[in-house]
């Protein structure tokens, strides 16, 4: 991107960029860790294609970080050894469960099933809160420092891209 083309991203774009990079980085790491356990050749090829696709997505998205709200360039020496991968995976699972349960409630006509989904939604929200609190406390999710949050995204994406399969 040339200097003339570069414009500051809007806040909502920056936050969506963060969500997509964080989600795809965690997914890419999971795929790269799991592929060794896949014995079916056809399924292993699907994993490779998905890995390739996610790597391409991340490389494209990382180019937008210098235009992101709050972006602060970081030195290689600033990279964290522990990326909080497992905590991020748990956070992603809890977010997706909340989305799925909320959608299921809107599609449910049976009162007993709706009540069950609602109770599970409340439980999933509490789980998300516990995971977020853990991540924030340990510095894995600096939610109140956008520059640091975006820096963590870049570190996680770079770590995912460097992982061997």
Image: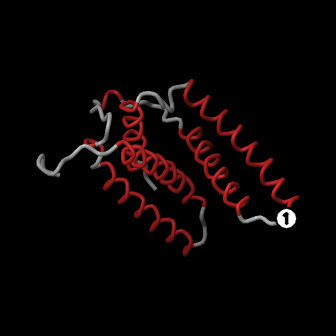
Task: Measuring from the top left, give residue 103's x and y in whole percent.
Answer: 67, 59
Q: How is the image coloured?
A: secondary structure
> What residue appears at the point 65 percent right and 46 percent down from the top-left corner?
94
Q: Is residue 111 above or below residue 91?
A: below
Outermost residue on the right side: it is 112
Q: In terms of image quadrants, where is residue 34?
A: bottom right
> What residue appears at the point 76 percent right and 42 percent down from the top-left corner?
123
Outermost residue on the top side: it is 137
Q: In terms of image quadrants, where is residue 114?
A: bottom right
Q: Is residue 132 above or below residue 115?
A: above
Q: Is residue 21 left or right of residue 77?
A: right
According to the picture, the residue beneath numbered tag 1 turns out to be 110
Q: Is residue 130 left or right of residue 135?
A: right
> How many circles with numbers are drawn on the protein?
1
Towards the viewer: 52 or 17 = 17
Q: Residues within 10 Å of mark 1 (few under 14, many from 20)?
A: few
Towards the viewer: 33 or 149 = 149
Task: Measuring from the top left, give residue 112's x and y in whole percent.
Answer: 88, 58
> What residue appears at the point 60 percent right and 42 percent down from the top-left corner?
91
Q: Secondary structure at mark 1?
A: loop
Q: Is residue 75 left or right of residue 46?
A: left
Task: Measuring from the top left, give residue 160's x and y in whole percent.
Answer: 43, 48
Q: In terms of image quadrants, where is residue 86?
A: top right
Q: Is residue 53 above or below residue 80?
A: below
Task: Measuring from the top left, give residue 128's x and y in whole percent.
Answer: 65, 39
Q: Is residue 20 above or below residue 111?
A: above
Towards the viewer: 161 or 59 = 59
């Amino acid at each position: 991107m040339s200097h003339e083309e570069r414009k500051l991203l809007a806040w909502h774009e920056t936050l969506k960029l963060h969500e997509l990079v964080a989600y795809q980085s965690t997914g890419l790491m999971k795929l790269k860790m799991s592929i060794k356990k896949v014995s079916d050749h056809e399924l292993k090829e699907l994993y490779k294609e998905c890995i390739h696709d996610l790597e391409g997505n991340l490389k494209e998205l990382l180019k937008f970080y210098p235009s992101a709200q709050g972006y602060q360039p970081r030195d290689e020496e600033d990279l964290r050894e522990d990326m909080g991968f497992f905590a991020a995976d748990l956070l992603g699972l809890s977010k997706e469960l909340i989305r799925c349960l909320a959608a299921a409630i809107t599609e449910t006509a049976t009162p007993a099933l709706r009540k069950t989904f609602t109770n599970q939604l409340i439980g999933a929200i509490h789980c998300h809160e516990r995971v977020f609190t853990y991540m924030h406390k340990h510095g894995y999710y600096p939610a109140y420092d956008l520059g640091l949050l975006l820096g963590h995204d870049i570190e996680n994406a770079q770590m995912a891209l460097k992982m061997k399969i």
